[in-house]
Amino acid sequence: MAFSSKHRSDVLQTMSEKQYDLLIIGGGITGSGIALDAVSRGMTVALVEMQDFAAGTSSRSTKLVHGGLRYLKQFEVKLVAEVGRERAIVYENGPHVTTPEWMLLPIYRGGTFGKWSTSVGLWLYDRLAGVKQSERRTMLDARQTLEKEPLLKRDGLLGGGYYVEYRTDDARLTIEVIKKAVELGADAVNYVKAEQFLYDERGRAIGARCRDLIGGRVYDIRAKKVVNAAGPWVDALRDKDGSKTGKRLRLTKGVHIVIDQKRFPLKQAVYFDTPDGRMVFAIPRDGKTYVGTTDTFYDDDPAHPAMTEEDRDYLLQAIHYMFPSVGVTADDVESSWAGVRPLIYEEGKNPSEISRKDEIWTSPSGLITIAGGKLTGYRKMAETVVDLVAKQLEKEERKTFRPCQTKQLPISGGDVGGSHRLPAFIAEKAEEAVRYGLTKEAGARLARQYGTNVDRLFALSQQYDRSSGLTRETFIRLVYAMEEEMAAKPVDYFIRRTGALLFDIDSVWREKEAVVAFMARYLGWTGEERDVYEKELDKELRRAVLAEEGAK
């Protein structure tokens, strides 16, 4: 069924008329990964997401599919080995949304990392993570370290470790995973809230009563198995099921700030110590430098975490400490994002010490809950959950399913012939774009962001309407987002489909009026709906600069 925001209510109607093998609640990377794994094995799958896909933690991370170097400090060797191997799979299955990024770890006298321990740690990391020869760590002296990044503090610098991480667009990774699941037959809808569970006469969970938060209607969606993959809302759903006992979540907040490279001309991604012993990333991306993350306990609304003055100042101090010649101020912060991490509570531990491991719990009603975990490990987490579901269905229904298929299954847009083919693919598409009235630069940009789906965007160029007030590139991105990525609101487009609100906020101010007007016509909004969505976008724009609550 089409993954179009125009057809949301049709999809919901169909979902209410079926019985599925599996209903997943939560459309972040975890739920999307489970949907893809399950449908690729032959299960019938439904997924509902209360906000937009990836709107929670899955669009608010440090945007790294990383191998978990920090976990070596906590001696979580098995975790490092697993996530290290997984990141290579994530990269090969979607090279258009993930890219290798060399990372510099500067070593200072009296710092957290010594020269010998860093060398051994990175060597071990490479071996555990199965890093290929060309991407294995090298150790640098102080002069070589400064050559890589001249802005670094010189005082006490002993050298550095140089190793590979993987940078990603976390929201687009999630969208491409859910699109692939839909392509294979899953039914998925955003802005649908599971309000209560449905049970059979034995008290087994057999679905959920769901409210369409856009259309207002209520639908019962039935399934043989129900998975709670709601991230920060996992415990709220366990509450509805009457099964919130034993372990529970502890939310922590992470904030990132974005500064133009003209003000912070970072050449090289850096992972560095802060004065309080925490570690922070500074990463160049698309003409900007972003810095994060903070790590503080969070007890407010998980739907709207935001940067406060305190968060912003902490990160600015970290920049001043490690890059003393960069005189950035609060006025240089163009944008920010804040996310909450749903960690499994551990008594007496501070936020950065709590394990990022995932756990699976099954309640007396049969509700399966997955909690914790990391972006990098999403595919493996999904495999574990679907193995459990398959085992139960095989026992109860005498059904058999294929084993896990996702290890070598390209996600939507990812089938470019392997990561080594991506540069040639982008170059080909840059040339081709000219035939569709686009520049080569725009063609390369689109191919890099959409992978093999770029052909669909090129085709949409033929429908370009100059009177829309949109540029040709914005027009095709926007129509594609609505027709094939279920973007239902302006915030979906500007934050999660394009990342513009984070990394090109000026373009959002410039284009927002035309985008809102076009979406209103295309999706047939009432005047009231348009007003609500416009205000929502304005609120997100203000929040990106500084939180409205508690920041004055």
Image: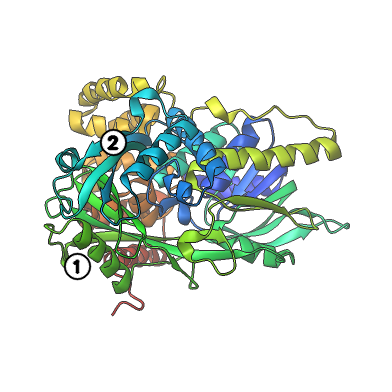
Q: Which mark is residue 139?
A: 2
Residue 265 x %, y %: 14, 49
How crowded pointer 2 is (Cα within 10 Å; few <14, some 14-19, many 20+) is rated as some
Q: Residue at x 47, y 43 (%)?
A: 174
Give the colouring mode of the picture.
rainbow
Left or right: residue 258 versus residue 355 is: left
Residue 357 x %, y %: 57, 50
How crowded pointer 1 is (Cα within 10 Å; few <14, some 14-19, many 20+) is rated as few
The reply to whether residue 285 is visible in this rendering is no
Q: Which tag, 1 or 2, sits closer to the chain's start?
A: 2
Q: Amino acid at mark 1?
A: Ala
Using the image, determine if residue 16 lies above or below residue 143: below
Give 329 or 432, whichever is nearer the viewer.
329
The reply to whether residue 83 is visible in this rendering is yes
Distance between the Cα atoms at labels 1 and 2?
A: 35 Å
Left or right: residue 394 versus residue 534 is: right
Quadrant, the C terminus: bottom left
Q: Which residue is mark 1?
A: 330
Q: Residue at x 33, y 46 (%)?
A: 498
Using the image, determine if residue 27 lies above or below residue 119: below
Residue 164 x %, y %: 34, 36
